[in-house]
Image (cartoon, coloured by chain):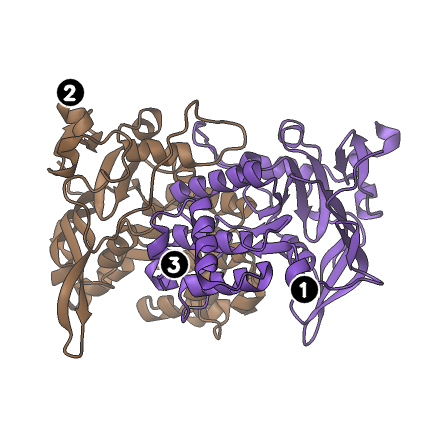
Amino acid sequence: MSTALLKIENLKKYFPIKVGLFGKIAGYVKAVDRVSLNIDSREVVSLVGESGSGKTTIAKCILLLEKPTDGRMLYKGEDIILFRGEKLREYRRGVQAVFQNPFLSLDPRMSVFEILSEPVKNNLNLSKMELHEYMLKLLEMVGLDGSFLEKYPHELSGGQAQRVAIARAISLKPKLLILDEPTSALDVSVQAQILNLLADLKNELGLSYLLITHDLSIVRYISDRIIVMYLGRVMEAGLSEEIFNEPLHPYTQALFSSIPDPYYREPKRISLRGEPPSPINPPPGCRFHTRCPHAVEICGRKEPLEYEASKTHKVYCWLHLEK
Amino acid sequence: MREQPLLQVENLTIDYILADSIIKAVRNASFAIGKGEILCLVGESGSGKTTIGLAIAGALPENAVIREGRIIFKEKRILGRGSKISTGKEDKIMMIFQDPASALNPLFKVGEVISDIIKNHLGIDNSVKIKEKALELFRMVELPDPERVFDSYPHELSGGMLQRVVIAIALSANPALLIADEPTTMLDVTLQAQILNLLLNLRRRLGLSMLFITHNLGVAAEVSDRIIVMYAGEIVEEAKTRELLNNPLHPYTRGLIECIPRTHIRYSKLKSIPGTIPDLRNPPKWCIFADRCTEAVDLCYKIKPDLIEFSKDHRVSCHLYRADKK
């Protein structure tokens, strides 16, 4: 078996809650709790979940912006946490990110040329001419022309700014892009443009994506596999088609039926009661049981084990285990 | 004779004055909302939908200038020549916003805020009665544990609960019209579904009219009776909800519908509308959508199309449907 490009095993990230003058630890926010996933080369994996599900915390751990509490993260089979020096630089070149709001991730005082050239200057040895040409090539790849080099972020529309952020992310020929809600701040007509661009770039450059989103409707056509999270835990994981054709977890089903679609209405809408509980003291047993329409006694008592619907499709729910 | 609509907006034109330029945010918008009707304004950013909402609520920022138009509410002018800005008890238009957390003062308990409004709007002075009324409103918006909510600060409540609190506050003045500006955009989909249901329930129970502002056609389809599609400050199409969705006329509306990613269809490529919205400092004198339109002809770059009645209750502003072509 070939090694996965990125492999995460039992990742945990607990944030301590400090109280009082001396910072006594009163408890933990269990943002990510024992999550495993892997991303192969040229594969698109989507992490889907609502706020508080821990999807962005996973991204931050991968990008080394947060230190995991426990668990391992392997890049090409090697532990990311142990990377130092040139190895770390190589990892940072290999794994880049695009965030939700391009106006927050682009420095307002830098022109597009400066934004795009900074990582390139620091990592590649290019002459002035070569650099300029490389910038033009980058812009062309994301569907912008050379006139944008002189512009500043405030002169760009949301879609254009997101294109610049994508150009910056691919400027060092990465292997993996972490896309954290890349289209959530954009209008629908522009959202489609950006998703199409990402799909094209993936094919052209042989990229892998970890796409993080709360919106199930945008992930189908771009992802190979989908992982559904709730309150820091994985609820269901499978191939994109498996999740869309036969969602097995009640939470996934509820997510699907909550998406307002102008033309299609689920025969019977599953509406969830209440709100997601706090991740500080997540419910015992299955974390979803407090809102689950099918919950039975065992759900509140014991955490569900893994149920294999197929080799690639896994669900964590007692309903399927009890059968 | 036809019944007078609850709210009538005529030729509304609004500019924003900036330090070095003027943004023509809304141009010539006319529409009406009937009693008990939910009208959706749908459009992308910069379409002017929020500006219209703010104008009706009388809450436009200071740099906004109303160039033209009038707004008639309950047969009284509330905007335009000879209008009176009504305040206090007569004010029967309430507005709720996208971010409920920023709509509430973090230093006041939720109960204090709603008590204040009940006191001022309903003229109830007895604190026990005020609290009773507040709890009744909290129950009406299906808040769990209203007693606890009453004594909570905004930071102690979740986004979905805060939006319910804000809706309760808006209802406390017995409004005839509720303007809801993207009320579910910041919420997760499962909570969004709950809030939409709540708003529909309230309409059924209270006969509330609503101006619902959203960028999401799916949401609009779910709550509205009628939809107005706006683009770059102008109304491009208006029809009953089903009619608009099943028989969209304007190329922009059609494009917008095709852009929506749908869960039960597998795409090889998503449709998109090329280009971006025009500069509102200097909007084109011709059709506002021509630059992005795939069906534009010479005429579209010369003359601005009027909003014409294509069929009963279905208005569109596009040269493709002008009278001599019908």
| Amino acid type of the residue tagged 1 in the rendering | Thr
Q: Viewer-nearest of labels 2 and 3?
A: 3
Query: How far apart are the two marked residues, 3 and 1, measured between alpha carbons?
Result: 26 Å
Place of residue A203 in the rendered image (x, y in percent of width and height, measured from the top left):
38, 41
Query: Chain ID for label 1?
Result: B
Q: Nearer the viewer, residue B237 or A125?
A: B237
| Amino acid type of the residue tagged 3 in the rendering | Phe
Q: State which quarter of the image contains the N terminus of chain A.
A: top left
Q: Nearer the viewer, residue A277 or B289?
A: A277
Q: Few, some or many C-alpha atoms within 10 Å of disc 3 (few <14, some 14-19, many ≥20)? A: many
Colour applied to chain A: brown
| Secondary structure found at label 2 | loop
- Residue at numbered disc 2: A323
Res A116 seen here: no
Q: State which quarter of the image contains the C terminus of chain A.
A: top left
- Residue at numbered disc 1: B87
From the viewer's perspective, is A237 left or right of B301? left
Query: What residue sits 82% from the left and 47% below the top?
Result: B304
From the viewer's perspective, is A169 left or right of B91? left
Query: What residue sits 56% from the left and 46% below the top?
Result: B215
Answer above or below: position of B254 versus A130: above
Query: Chain ID for label 2?
Result: A
| Amino acid type of the residue tagged 2 in the rendering | Lys
Query: What residue sits 51% from the left and 37% below the top?
Result: B201
| Secondary structure found at label 3 | helix
Q: Residue furthest bottom?
A: A21
